Each structure stands twice: as structure tokens, then as C-alpha cells.
Amino acid sequence: MTASSAIVIGAGISGLSAGIYARLNGYDVTVFESHSQPGGVAACWKRGEYLFDGGIHFLPPADPNLDIYDLYLELGLEYLPTVPMNQYCRFTDIEHRTSVDITDNLDDLQMRLLARFPEDTSVIYEILSPARSMSESDTTNFGFDKPSELMGIRDKVSEIWQMRGFMRFMFGKYALSAEDFSQRISNPVLRDIVKMMFLPEVPIWFISMILGQVASGQIALLENGSISLVSRLVDRLTQLGGKISYRSEVKEILIESDRAVGIRLEDESQHRADYIIPAMDMHSIFFSLLGGKYVSDNLAYRFAKWDLCRPILIINYGVAMEFSDEPWLNIWKLDSPIRIGTEDVSYLMTRIFNYGNSFAPSGKTVIQVELETDWDYWYNLHEFDMDTYQSEKERIASEVADFHNQFYEGFKDAIEVTDVSTPFTMWRYTKNYRGAYMGWLPASDLLMTRFKKKIPGLANCFLAGQWAMGMGGVLPAIYSGRQAIQLVCSSDGRPFQTIQ
Ligand SMILES: Cc1cc2nc3c(=O)[nH]c(=O)nc-3n(C[C@H](O)[C@H](O)[C@H](O)COP(=O)(O)OP(=O)(O)OC[C@H]3O[C@@H](n4cnc5c(N)ncnc54)[C@H](O)[C@@H]3O)c2cc1C
């Protein structure tokens, strides 16, 4: 009998992608999602007149000149509205009274950095030369076309060819983390810029790549927020005949003779299918849904040794003010840190949603501030001291508003709505282990690792999701769903289809 059905667990970007490719290949598919909404961490929520977007900052635009355009066509994303980024961020160091704009013109950026930090001339060239080369290559395709299980020598050569424009910058000193690389920098302000532009753990080539992508328009802002991407994926899936079952938390993957045959939901109902694709947090897949039975030494090592993406507190303010001259992202190095639990937080990331008309009515703006914080602190407060959980949210939101009031006159008085989500909130709505909203921390070696999607010892179950790619991001999530269905097709001896 020909296998014909698949169950996907999770309606995040990876699960929606898996559902779409399952339908394109003729499988009946239902996506089971524990939340009442799709999108997972790519979440938007409405508060009064304001739309808060707690997800995606930027992604490649739907540009026919980019390699990933074909992927967008497969998924119905070809008309995704985006706004070009003419600036990556403004970095402001309060103690040193310095602001530096990281803009899209690399010549201008180089000139300003050399003038401002002459003592670090050689390091500036070391970062900007690869950025310039990368801006001339297509860096949107990371060689995710096939799962590693299906890659032969020819595919590996083709992957190297696809990545030829930037591969030479991925080794040697360029593989150092941004933080380690920044130790070579004499000026403390430039050191902080390099360390904090993305995450301190990403390799320095990743920072050069972002600069190159901004310069060449290979990344852009979502004009109408994460919801515009997610709703297109949902539309594509449902138009193809796929189903989504919301408020359906899966608590067990049913197994017979080491073959996945279905799922059991929280309400004890059982659903059977030929293939099961978990597209969600990997800790829950292995230790909860599979009951700890298929934990390989390799996986146990990862959970013991690899760092998770640090959780964040996200504060959204709906403000009756305009911020038309501000860059979309401000990174602040504070002179007096904000205390959260036992930690001092010295950096704030302020997203200013002053592009697009979806986030706030005319004359008003959504301002979002992200602070890295600790999982255990918020988890313990939520479990054992709810009053302090609430009051801490309010105190931090108030301190952060005071801080912004110094730079934007009248900010505090203009706040109409405040919304704070903690790492616990992230877990509650998306189930990502310990609030790790992008899975594993994308260190140099992880970015170079190709993860297997087959689970050793278990048939008919293929992993999708950001955790199964070793890096978070819209494209890895999309490709993870695509790769899982490539493995399904391969198991059935069918050619993998990407068109209807
Ligand atoms: C603040 C923030 C900024 C980001 N910025 C960017 C960016 O600029 N560019 C970029 O490319 N990426 C960015 N990302 C990352 C990107 O959004 C994610 O990598 C991607 O959305 C992950 O999708 P996923 O489907 O793998 O996982 P998830 O979004 O975690 O989806 C998993 C889904 O599974 C569901 N689920 C979990 N357990 C169960 C269960 N037992 N039963 C049923 N359902 C279950 C969850 O509810 C969830 O909907 C950002 C993320 C965040 C949070």
C-alpha cells in the first residue's frame, strides 16, 4: 500500500512549511498546534490600537534576483511586502557619549569608522573587506537544498559552489566568535559594537555577512510584521488542502515496533498517520513526546554541553508619538545597568516600528525593547511568587521607559499601552525549552554542522524545526520542513515535488 498521510506537530514556520511540502507531494496532512494561533515564536498580538510583533526582525526580501526566490515561490511568499533597510542599527554608548550608525553604504561606513577609531584601522578592514565581498555574492542560500541524509558527493560540491562567495571567509580568524574577535579591538566602543551587533557568540564572518546583506539589500524588514509571513503560509497550506488543528497539544508520539504511527493529544484522542513530523522544541520531542527512549549519546551530549539561545524579556510600548527620523534598531550600552534578579543588564535593543502602517495608527508608534535575561529567575517567580513576577515586570518596564525618556522627550507621558513578555511567556505560548526562542546558540561550529533529521532507531518520524537545523531563523525553519518531507518522499521512493 502506498503511504499517504502525514501529521505535523507545531504550526510554527517550520511546521507550516512541512505541511505545504507534504501537500505538494500528495500527502494528506494535518498540523496539530497547541496554541490557538499559528506562527510559534513568529508571533504578533494586538493590544488596543497597537500590533505588537514579538518575532522576526529581518529576512531576505522576495527579490527574483536572489537564490531563495524559488523557495518563496514554492511557499506563496513571492508578494511578501518588505521595507529596505538603509541602516542596520545605531549603537549608542552612554558612558562614552558616542553614537555610531551602521549603515548600508560600506564606503561611507568605512570612512566614518576609520575617522572615529583610527587605532583600529586594520580590524575595521578585516571586518569590512569580507562584508564588501559578501555584498557582491548571494548569501541567502546556505546550502540547505537537501537533508544531509540524502546528500551525495555531487550535492556537496554543489553546496560548496552555492556558497563560494562567502565560504572562504568562514575559517581561521573569521570563525572566531564576535566576542573573541572583539578582544583584538583597542577602542572599547568599537569592541562593544562588534560584540553586540548580533549575538556575541556568532562567528565574526556572520557579522560581516549581515553588513554585506544590508549593503546589497539581501535582508529587509517585514512591512506588516511576522503575521504577514505566517498568514501567507497558512493560506498556502489550506489552499492546498492541508488542515490545522489548533488548541491540540500533542503529548505522545505513538510507536509500534520502533515505527511512529500516530500521536496522542492532551485530551487523550489518538490520530494515526504514515509519517510523523515533529516541528517544535527538541527537548520536548525527545524527553516528553518520545518518553526519553530515542535519546542518542550525541543528543544527550548536545543537551549537556551546547549553550541555548539566551532568553529575553520583551517590553512593548504603544506610544502616542512619532519617531520618523529614528533608525529601526537602536542598541544601547547603558552607563547604569538594569538589575534583573541577580544579573545586571547593560545592553538594551530598541526596535522602532516606524515603517509600515500596520503596527500603530497615524501619529503613534510601537517601541519594543529586548533585554537578555535568565530563565530560572522568571520561571521560579512565576511558579512560587506571582506577585513579584508581576511587580518585577512593571518595575523593569518603568525603568526602561525612564531610560528612553532621557532621549525622547515626553516618551513616558505618551505611553498608552505597555505589554511585557518574559521567558516564561515565550515558553507558555511556544513551548521552547527554557525560553530559548531560537534553539541552540548559533556558535561557529554549530553553524557549520549539518543536523540529521532521521531519529536513530525510529522509522517514519523526521525532525523539522529550528532546533533540528542548529540555528534559528526563518530560512532554516522553512528548509527544515522541506527537508523532512524530502525524507518522507525518499522513504516512499517518490520524487520530491515543489509545484502543484
Ligand atoms: C524576537 C525574535 C526575533 C527573531 N528575529 C529573526 C530574524 O530577524 N530573522 C530570522 O530569520 N529569524 C528570526 N527569528 C527566529 C525565527 O522566527 C525562528 O527561528 C522561527 O520562527 C522558528 O520556527 P519553528 O517553527 O522552528 O519553531 P517555533 O516557532 O518554536 O514553532 C513551534 C510550534 O510548535 C508548537 N508546539 C510545541 N509543542 C507542541 C506540542 N506538544 N503540541 C502541539 N504543538 C506544539 C508551538 O506552539 C509552536 O507554534 C526571531 C525570533 C524571535 C523570537
Image (spheres, grey):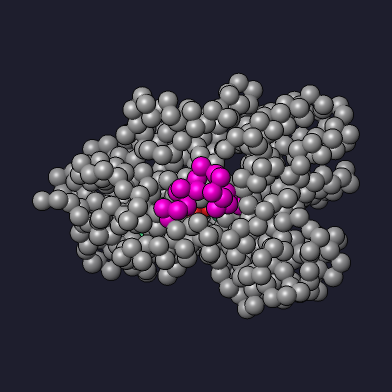
- Magenta-drawn segment: 58-75
- 144 falls in the magenta region: no
Q: Nearer the viewer, residue 197 or 343?
A: 197
Residue at the image position 41 percent from the left and 39 percent from the top: 145
210 in relation to 351, above or below: above
Residue at the image position 69 percent from the left and 76 percent from the top: 361
Residue at the image position 48 percent from the left and 57 percent from the top: 77
Q: Position of residue 435 (x, y in %)?
A: 52, 53
Q: How many marks?
A: 0
390 in relation to 484, above or below: below
35 left or right of 361 in image:
left
Residue at the image position 20 percent from the left and 59 percent from the top: 272
Q: Nearer the viewer, residue 191 or 274?
A: 274
Q: Quarter of the image holding residue 266?
A: bottom left
376 left or right of 149 in image:
right
Residue at the far left in the pictured view: 1
Residue at the far front in the pictured view: 64
- 65 falls in the magenta region: yes
Q: Position of residue 86 (x, y in %)?
A: 73, 50
Q: Position of residue 189 (x, y in %)?
A: 81, 38
Q: Nearer the viewer, residue 375 or 200?
A: 200
- Figure quadrant of the C terminus: bottom left
Q: Quarter of the image holding residue 443?
A: top right
Res. 195 visible in picture: yes
209 in relation to 83, above or below: above
Q: Position of residue 112 (x, y in %)?
A: 85, 38
